[in-house]
Image (cartoon, rainbow, N blue to C red):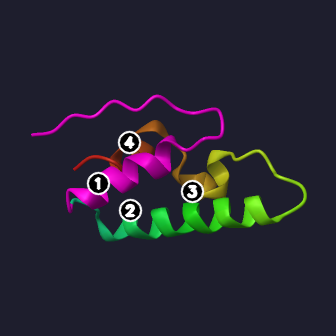
Amino acid sequence: MVYEHFNNHFHGYVVENCLQVLEIISELTPEQIEDKRKIQVYFKTAKSSTKVEKPFLEMFVEPTELSFDSLIRRFID
């Protein structure tokens, strides 16, 4: 069993970093693969735009899935 602690950077990279580690250890679920893709598209778009929008959770997850339980289930089995 592996435990990892992530400290969120002010740019909000912690979610992407967590998913990258899961990918390295071959533990990404199909849902997490899609989440990682959305996050990468967002950061690529944000960097290329003239106005960088502050990231917020609703950009990556539907508002109906914002309960703590549904969010934490995306990252643990």
Viewer-proximal residue, 34 or 11?
11
Q: Mark 1 or mark 4, which has the lower sequence index?
A: 1
Q: Report which residue position mark 4 lands on.
A: 72
Q: Amino acid at mark 4?
A: Ile
Single out the mark in the foreground, 2 or 1.
1
Q: Mark 4 or mark 2, which has the lower sequence index?
A: 2
Q: Splitting the image into 4 quarters, where does residue 62 fall?
A: bottom right
Q: Mark 3 or mark 1, which has the lower sequence index?
A: 1
Residue extent of the magenta highlight? 1-26
Position of residue 18 relative to residue 45, above or below, is above
Viewer-proximal residue, 45 or 75?
45
Q: What's the distance in space between the residues labelled 2 and 3, CA to CA? A: 11 Å
Q: What's the distance in space between the residues labelled 2 and 1, CA to CA? A: 9 Å
Single out the mark in the foreground, 4 or 2.
2
Q: Are marks 2 and 3 in contact (CB under 8 Å)?
A: no
- In this view, which residue lies farthest toward the left? 1
Viewer-proximal residue, 13 or 75?
13
Residue 75 on image: x %, y %: 34, 48
Residue at the (65%, 40%) spot, across then down: 11
Q: Report which residue position mark 2 lands on.
A: 32
Residue at the (56%, 56%) spot, across then down: 61
Q: Report which residue position mark 3 lands on.
A: 61
Residue at the (46%, 28%) spot, across then down: 7
- In this view, which residue lies farthest toward the right? 50
Q: Mark 3 or mark 4, which has the lower sequence index?
A: 3
Position of residue 62 relative to residue 30, above or below, is above
Single out the mark in the foreground, 1 or 4.
1
10 Å crowding of disc 4: few (<14), some (14-19), many (20+): few
Q: Splitting the image into 4 quarters, where does residue 2 fall?
A: top left
Q: Are marks 2 and 1 in contact (CB under 8 Å)?
A: yes
